[in-house]
Amino acid sequence: MENYLSRKSLTKISVWLVLPLFSSTLISAPEVTPKHVSVAAEDITIQKLQRPESKGSFSHSSMLPIYQSGTHNLAFDAQEGTPILFLSPNAEQWQMTVTDPNGGSVIRETKGNSLAASGISFGQENFKGKTVLVENPVSGNWQVTLTNTEINQTQDSKPQGYLLFKGDPKYQLYTHLDNNITTENQSINLVAYMVNAGSDSANREMMLQKRPMQNLVASAKAVITTPSGLKIQLNLNDSGTNGDQVAGDGQYSAKVPTNASGVYQTQVQVFGTRPDGTAYSRTSNDIYRIEPQSYALSNKPARMDAIGGTKTLINVPVSVFDASQPVFLAAEVWGTDNQGKMKAASWIGGVSSAITENDQSYLQLSFDYRWLQREEVNAPYQLRNIRLQTADTNVPLSILDSLALNAPMNLNYVSNTLRVVGEKTSQSQKKPATRDMLMGNAPTLAAFSTAEITPMATPKLLLVHGYCSGKVWNAGSFTNAAEFQDYNKNRSHEQFALQILNFGAPYSSYGIIAHSQGGAASVHLYSRYWSGLDYATGGRLIQSVGTPYRGTALAGNLAALGEIFGVGCGTNTDLTYTGASNWLSTIPSWARAEVDYYTTTFNDRWWAYDYCHLGSDLLLSDPEDGTTENWAGQLSGAVNKGLKSGWCHTTGMRDPAQYNDSSRNSSMNSRAAR
């Protein structure tokens, strides 16, 4: 019966991957075997899809598009030293004049007295620009004149540059979409409002509890760039019409386009006056993905089929519009306790492809009914919080609150005969879940590895880089290590994980040390597919440094900058706050527990304006490492190894790159599983 289970519920997907580290041609990869995973009832909360209003972006800065020469009035309310940046592909051809509210000249460029145009870092990417550092800013109306007589001045839809400056972090703009399901022709509103952050600007949970400030916004608009490049300007309103829900509540809204699949850019600009009479400006740049509706959940009852031993298959009825696309299915399994009340037994999830029986299509997940015994529940059963997400991008496609779950009588009988009779079992008395209850039965090593036929078939430590990255690790500092080399690529967590799976195929087992996005891709691999990680022994399975598990504000801003510079690795919605939240809901609590993660930040001196890099400092909340804010580097349920000062995300920043910390690298090496 075990062979039947692996054939029926663990779909094997043959994939083809480009492996630049070995060859420039397509080669066959090992079969990819998805896991169908479960999570104990007491850990279900961590698997819930978060509310859409909790997944947005806070901003304390402005990034204003510049279309032509002229004078620009800045509503400048910064309370500390801050740079004013002008970024442009031909920055050296522009001249700047900056004047404070008192008429004082901060900088006046002429042909014989000009600022140097240099590279300004935003995470892994650099853009050409000019920097003016304002040591002691005065709030008020600043003027920046930008002049360029060497190029044609146009009102083209594409900016010729961006002007960036920082505001008072006590007053922040928050923007979010109001719908978790982002599919074609779905009704979705973009919402923006101002909050008084007070001293909580680095505490996202506290920030999300802030109520919108009323009567602070004079104008709110958004420019949406569609996947085809079309720009649509929207006026956000607080009148209770045209996408706004409640008039006068301080939340400004407008409907966003969803008529085509792909990645959309949003640039929100808000201007207004603070309660103390100071004018301010804030902007927020983000990206959102619209997917075709490939699957939809049905309201028909789901079915549980016993297939031998303690294994069952849960069949969830669906409508299928594109069967070529695998989908991630997740749900909570509930049963009835001794008092006749519904009680959670387990969360289940995994990649699934549709099957059809008697003109009805189903998605299947394997499930171990020992979860029912552990929670002492019987029929009637239910599925709750059922959802479908795209397997690659984690975009929610369909959500249902509950479905009836029919089960065969023999399953009820077995469950009854094994139940503990008498007083209710306490949480401390419950038997711990076994490995096969959490992730099913492991396939043979040959199912995903070539280790049996290669001389490299030894345990290894894989060193994994991050998004759009070159070489970061010094392999000579690690023992028995192999360096993953998928350099300068932009991949979703799913695509990245499959690249790691393929790279690790020659080894019988491995642990991973990863930088930046590589940490997310590694835990994604462990959560979703069988790999050499499942056979590693001897220490910490996954260790990461500087990973933005909860996203980064740079993802949306890089999309805007990449449009005018024509460079960069491209958009990646997994790295946005919304995309990261969607993805995290698919990562089981027990997989997170196998991650040890480190975060860093710059040395902060009280007498100076400190940062990892001027550019990213404008867009991130302290403490941060130049790419990852400390709060966004936290992985709930994992092992937090702490925040260390004096180290930045990558080379070219003010403090050394975090992956060059020899003390930490030595510790990770000695404690790594292989």
Image (spheres, rainbow, N blue to C red):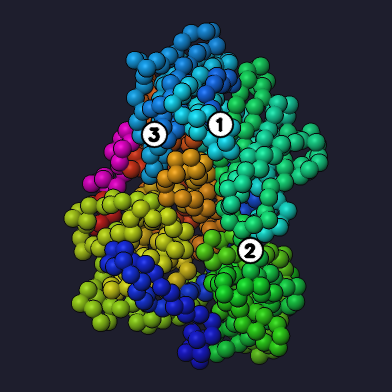
Which disc is residue 154 wearing?
Answer: 1
Q: Which residue is drawn at 71% across and 88% down?
A: 358
Q: Which of 455 and 608 is in front in this view?
A: 455
Q: Residue at x 73, y 29 (%)?
A: 214
Marks 1 and 2, the one that precedes in the sequence: 1
Q: Where is residue 482 in the image (x, y as percent from the top left)?
A: 25, 63
- Location of residue 23 (image quadrant): bottom left
SS class, disc 2: loop
**Residue 344 seen:** no
Q: Where is residue 2 in the image (x, y as percent from the top left)?
A: 48, 88
Marks 1 and 3: in contact by CB < 8 Å? no
Q: Is residue 290 left or right of residue 18?
A: right
Name the residue tied to disc 2.
292
Disc 3 marks a residue whose amino acid type is Lys
CA gap, disc 1 and disc 2:
36 Å
CA gap, disc 3 and disc 1:
21 Å
- Location of residue 638 (image quadrant): bottom left
Q: Give the range drawn in magenta.
A: 651-664
Q: Residue at x 58, y 16 (%)?
A: 141
Disc 2 marks a residue whose amino acid type is Pro
SS class, disc 3: strand
Marks 3 and 2, the one that precedes in the sequence: 3
Does 652 appear in magenta? yes
In front of the other: label 1 or label 2?
1
Name the residue tied to disc 3.
128
- Location of residue 499 (image quadrant): bottom left
Q: Residue at x 44, y 44 (%)?
A: 566
Disc 1 marks a residue whose amino acid type is Thr
Q: Position of residue 515 (x, y in %)?
A: 35, 52
Which quadrant is home to the C terminus?
Answer: bottom left
